[in-house]
Amino acid sequence: MIQEGTQGLFFNNTYNTIVTDSAASATQMATGVLSIPETIGVDYNGKPVETLMELAKKKGKSIGIISDAYVTDATPACFTAHTAKRGNRRDIARQQIKLGVDVISGGLKYFNTDENQHLLEEATAQGYQVALDRKDLNKITSGKLLGLFSEAGMPPAVEMYQHPQIPSLWDQTKKAIALLEQNKKGFVLMVEAGKIDWSAHANDAGGVLAEMKVIDEVISLARDYADKHPGTLVYVNADHDTGLGTFVYHHLDSNQAAHKTEQGEMLYGGNTYYADFRTYKLLEKQKRSLHSLAQELHEIPMERRTPDYIQRRLSEGLGYVVDISQFDNVRDINGLFKQLNRLYGLSWATGNHSAAPLISIAYGAQAERFGGVYHNTDIFPRLKDAFGWTERKK
Ligand SMILES: [Zn+2]
């Protein structure tokens, strides 16, 4: 087994709650202080706290935020803005421009609303180059970038093939690094693959797998950069778990047991399904997110929502044929997806966030500082130590 980097295990509870949202989690990561859910860049008393990106800017570094959700969403917001409510997205957009974040890249939401109609002009006046698609992005070779590539979040990874004009998270990260590294004093870049959470909220395993591949490619890009540029630290983690999903075995009824697995035969007389590795191959074929598929099917009037129709649309969306005749009451779409998950041995505890502890991986310079068991408020002090920014009392 290849051992690379330093692995850690960390917790993410907030000041007053066991379970977190992205706002509290990112605030705690970006500032090192405890916070409460739904607030952005403020401590649990509501007081604004200096963030990693603000400090980096003071130190003369270039800074960047990228998210394949929208760039005013909680995670990028907490590194670059301060506000009592994560819903104050117009205000967040204005603060991001005002701070002069060198690369802002992701979804368009709240940058072009009526109330913010002058924001893009203001940004341009401040030296930002606005890119709205892949072509625009390719033309930019230096200076500040405001990349706004979709109306809201970027499309689900499983549907990106329909949108060749939208640069992938990898493309955006590659460009961001090329722009930011022109600063001789260095840079700090935060990249979020925000739709892992969205897919997991929908208990969409194929969706999660595709979104994980997106961040996997970005991690490879960052690792290769660190290999070529000693002194670079790559730190990878999650802000929280969503769904608490995993494969579990289940017992088959007599009918299903006729198709028993070899492993099941040996251990439990063939009545147990232990989840088949081939399921990954099926999940990789998925062509639509379960969320958009569910939306479409919910909009079909009940009288047209026949098993045949659902069978056809489901198979097209998944990219393979599932025989839904084995399922009960398929016109209940949520129930249908639950039965689909169960068929593969996929079990989700919830459609919400859990308090499960999380794994972190650090790679490159000073990576060894991120080992052991810690809390997400420890990340910022450790980053400051790694960068030599911690002020020592004399
Ligand atoms: Zn979430």
Image: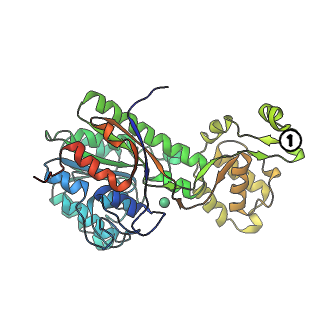
| Dot 1 crowding, Cα within 10 Å, few <14, some 14–19, many 20+ | some
Residue 350 against residue 138 in the figure, above or below = below
Q: Amino acid at mark 1?
A: Ala
The picture quadrant where one finds residue 179 is: top left
Closest to the observer: 50 or 335? 50
- Residue drawn at x 23%, y 34% is 231
Residue that label 1 marks: 257
User: Residue reaching furthest front?
Assistant: 394
Q: Which quadrant of the structure image shows residue 51?
A: bottom left
At x 37%, y 68%, the residue is 86
| x, y percent for residue 54 | 20, 57
Residue 186 visible (yes or no): yes
Query: In the image shown, does 264 or 320 lie closer to the viewer?
Result: 264
Q: Is 320 placed left or right of 29 in the picture? A: right
Residue 121: image quadrant is bottom left
Q: How many marks?
A: 1
Q: Is residue 71 visible?
A: no
Q: Could you tell me which secondary element the residue under label 1 belongs to?
A: helix
Left-right relation of 306 to 131: right
Q: Picture coordinates of residue 43 (x, y %)?
A: 30, 68
Say which residue appears at 60% left-offset and 51% top-offset.
245
